Image (cartoon, rainbow, N blue to C red):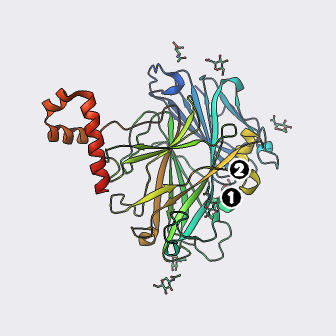
Amino acid sequence: MWSPEEPRWGWGPRAPTSLVLLSVLVSAAPLGLLGEETRQVFMEVISGCPTPQNLLYIRAVGTNSTLHYVWSSFGPPAVVLVATNTTQSVLKVNWSLLLSPDPEGGLMVHPKNSIQFSSALVFTRLLEFDSTKVSEGAAEPPGKPYPPYSLDKFSWNNITLDPDTLSTTFQGHPIDDPTGAFANGSLAFKVQAFSRSGRPAQPPRLLHTADTCQLEVALVGASSQGNHSLFGLEVVTLGNGPDCPSMKEQRSIDDEYAPAVFQLDQLLWGSLPSGFMQWRPVAFSQKQRNRESSLPCQASSLSPTLAYSLPHSPIVQAFFGSQNNFCTFNLTFGDPTGPGYWDQHYLCWSMLLGVGLPPIDSLSPLVLGIMAVALGAPGLVLLGGGLALLLRHKWYSEYQSIN
Ligand SMILES: *[C@@H]1O[C@H](CO)[C@@H](O)[C@H](O)[C@H]1NC(C)=O
Ligand SMILES: *[C@@H]1O[C@H](CO)[C@@H](O)[C@H](O)[C@H]1NC(C)=O
Ligand SMILES: *[C@@H]1O[C@H](CO)[C@@H](O)[C@H](O)[C@H]1NC(C)=O
Ligand SMILES: *[C@@H]1O[C@H](CO)[C@@H](O)[C@H](O)[C@H]1NC(C)=O
Ligand SMILES: *[C@@H]1O[C@H](CO)[C@@H](O)[C@H](O)[C@H]1NC(C)=O
Ligand SMILES: *[C@@H]1O[C@H](CO)[C@@H](O)[C@H](O)[C@H]1NC(C)=O
Ligand SMILES: *[C@@H]1O[C@H](CO)[C@@H](O)[C@H](O)[C@H]1NC(C)=O
């Protein structure tokens, strides 16, 4: 394997890097790119010298494919995701280009023809709304908007890796904070990679696989501009061709892992092999994440947006060049009546980003157990597929009415 001193990729000047190497047994996965069971995950901070900019580089190697995730807080927080059909593909960083006004070519994955899918997400603005000013009947926007915080005008910490959890946190606050709103507060982006599938201990307990990364966004301790503020995030992505990625809702009758949430939202970039972003439409207003602290999370539809109106992300331009179709959507957390950020000055939301088929929960043992008891286990076996489907619909509508 690699020794940390040996240059492996990147030809620009750079400071010594910290490297976390996690080796796992790579078991044969017949589907290649579309679902490796385990991957070798390498996580590294690539630093630019002399400027103290950091890139978080995650390289997830499977039997026949490699996923490259480059996260950056240089400009607004952003990630470039590249999936290749070989274990040999490498990331190349040219810092002098990346830091220049025209960064195109500053970030590349070689060999170019191994790239099966690539896209990016950029978190451009933290939105804030006055939820007391919601016009009657209007679902959107969730109140009168306050001036948003542009996340490219934030100052971010120097990231350090946590090798045990394969995670790191970008923590930031506005560079210019005249009202002192962030004097005791921060916005944090916690990125976590996985070498195999599993589920975190904390709700919403999204099922992850080795093909995914998790992002947890937390707003903690910042003063809001009003007494009843709802917060939101503006997210920018790249369209495939002239179209925006599609937003899909997946229904489920099972809420064991995310109390009272019967839905999974997905952003899909296109036909397979493609990328996805997946989240439960729930956020939490307390560190103690449970039903009482859960807030609804609403996603607007995607709309094409002109590049000049958006904060510019150097890593996105470095990899994709300047000719791009950007699409934007807003996520908003909470509603005027339920619990909110105002309770504890805390807001937390999480999502997965990955390639291939999005992980889907099967019915949890608990729910299967309830169904078996309700219907009688032998009956359930005899009734077979068709009737079970009907019952699922019935159950689903009952759950809905409770909701
Ligand atoms: C980085 O890009 C610049 C501009 O294209 C080029 O002059 C330079 O040689 C590149 N650096 C390396 C190490 O290749
Ligand atoms: C993955 O690689 C193995 C070994 O090289 C090969 O047998 C298998 O067919 C490959 N699978 C795919 C989907 O390319
Ligand atoms: C990867 O895909 C490219 C086409 O996109 C193909 O030319 C190449 O042979 C593939 N490589 C492997 C190792 O499957
Ligand atoms: C990050 O590290 C650089 C030098 O490595 C230092 O100049 C800079 O002040 C640090 N930034 C923060 C926010 O700690
Ligand atoms: C920040 O915390 C300090 C000490 O707890 C407190 O005195 C101050 O009022 C707080 N500032 C804001 C803006 O909340
Ligand atoms: C916020 O609450 C404080 C104390 O309850 C009150 O004095 C103030 O007018 C309120 N501000 C707004 C904008 O409603
Ligand atoms: C997101 O919210 C901001 C602030 O209200 C608004 O200006 C923008 O148009 C919204 N974007 C989308 C795609 O709805």
Looking at the rendered image, the quarter that the C terminus falls into is: bottom left
Identify which residue, 103 or 309, lies in the foreground. Answer: 309
**Residue 377 at x, y percent in the picture:** 15, 33
Q: Which residue is the site of mark 1?
A: 152
Disc 2/disc 1 C-alpha distance (Å): 8 Å
Callout 2 touching callout 1 (CB < 8 Å)? yes
Identify which residue, 257 or 214, lies in the foreground. Answer: 257
The yes-or-no answer for disc 1 within 8 Å of ligand 7 is no
Q: Is residue 193 left or right of residue 395?
A: right
Q: Secondary structure at mark 1?
A: helix
Check disc 2 and give the amino acid type: Ser
- Badge 2: how crowded within 10 Å, few (<14), some, or many (20+)? many
Taking the image as drawn, is residue 364 in sight? no
**Rendered view: 31 above or below 214:** above
**Rendered view: 276 above or below 180:** above
- Badge 1: how crowded within 10 Å, few (<14), some, or many (20+)? many
Q: Which residue is the site of mark 2?
A: 313
**Rendered view: 61 above or below 398:** above
**Residue 307 at x, y percent in the picture:** 74, 51
Check disc 1 and give the amino acid type: Asp
Residue at 56% x, 67% y is 128
* Number of marks present in the image shown: 2
Residue at 64% x, 35% y is 118
